[in-house]
Amino acid sequence: MTAHILNCLDTVTRDHPNAGVILLGDFNRLHDVSLLAYPLKEAVRSPTRKEAILDKIYTNLQDRYRQPTVIPNIGNSDHRAVLMSPAYSKNQDRGKDIVVTVRSQDANRKTLLAHAIQNVNWSPLYAMQGCDEMVTCFYDTITGVIDHYLPCVAMKRHTNDKPWVTDKFRRLIRCRQNAMVSGEKMKYRMLRNRVQRMSRQLRRKYYDRKVRDLRENNSRSWWRSVKQITGMESKSTVPLCGLADELYDGNMKALANGINESFQ
């Protein structure tokens, strides 16, 4: 396996001496002395499965990337995921934290609100003569009760959040991350499973409530919503002239032919 990897690296670097190399995967217990002598640098520093570093990243671009971060498992994998981000990217949209005002969604408060509405005395409303006066009285009464039991609160959000993400889901993720950092393995696995189940449920509910009917009525909006739910929504920040410069020495006609051949 080591010989195969080195032969592949030799083939690439022979034709492209200044190529950037990122060699990654589950290397298990593969001896990497020859890879480090190539020279490549192994970037992962934290365990990715139990106490072992099995999922590694070898690169000659270590100055272009941040130190890889080991994050929780994806799906049912027993390996943690490894995330390596560029050290700098002027086109990278990291989003930002924003503060929004939302109604309290506390279940107990909703129950109290229901009882309060049932016990409202509507006699003054029925005694009124004008329709506009009755409507104003009705809305003022209902709004006052709602404001009392379900007040508006300021909540922190992120501009890149998926539309189906809820405050309860955010809190559960924070608890999972805290359990991982503190080394509570049993608690972490329990919370990880809860996060996965809740994620599936929230996406399914959002799809049923907001997206399903669009498939027949507005296919364009349906595709846009599905891509947003699945994380596929991303617009290229590289202009076509940049692609032409990078791949075809600036020849736009050659780029168009390349795109056409790809679709064919």
Image: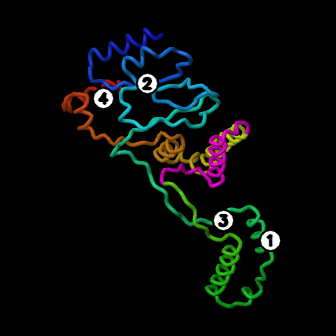
**Residue type indicated by callout 2:** Tyr
Residues at marks 2 and 1 touching, judged by CB atoms closer than 8 Å: no
Between circles 4 and 3, the one closer to the viewer is 3
Magenta-highlighted residues: 159-186
Is 11 left or right of 111, judged from the image as shown? left
Location of mark 1 (residue)? 115
User: Does residue 225 belong to the magenta stretch?
Assistant: no
Q: CA distance from mark 4 to mark 1?
A: 63 Å
Is 15 left or right of 183, judged from the image as shown? left
Color theme of the render? rainbow
Secondary structure beneath dot 2 equals strand
Residue occupying image coordinates x 74% and y 65%: 110
* Image quadrant in which you'd find residue 106: bottom right
Q: Tell me residue 81's x, y (percent).
A: 55, 32
Quadrant of the image for the C terminus?
top left
Secondary structure beneath dot 4 equals helix
Location of mark 2 (residue)? 58
Location of mark 3 (residue)? 104
Residues at marks 4 and 2 touching, judged by CB atoms closer than 8 Å: no
Q: Tell me residue 182's x, y (percent).
A: 66, 42
User: Does residue 168 belong to the magenta stretch?
Assistant: yes
Secondary structure beneath dot 1 equals helix
Does label 3 or label 2 sit earlier along the sequence?
A: 2
Residue occupying image coordinates x 64% and y 50%: 169
Q: CA distance from mark 4 to mark 3?
A: 50 Å
**Residue type indicated by callout 3:** Ser
Location of mark 4 (residue)? 259
Does label 1 or label 3 sit earlier along the sequence?
A: 3
- Mark 2, residues whose alpha carbon is within 10 Å: few (<14), some, or many (≥20)? many
Q: In terms of depth relative to the viewer, which is nearer, 243 or 142?
A: 243
Q: Tell me residue 158's x, y (percent).
A: 51, 54
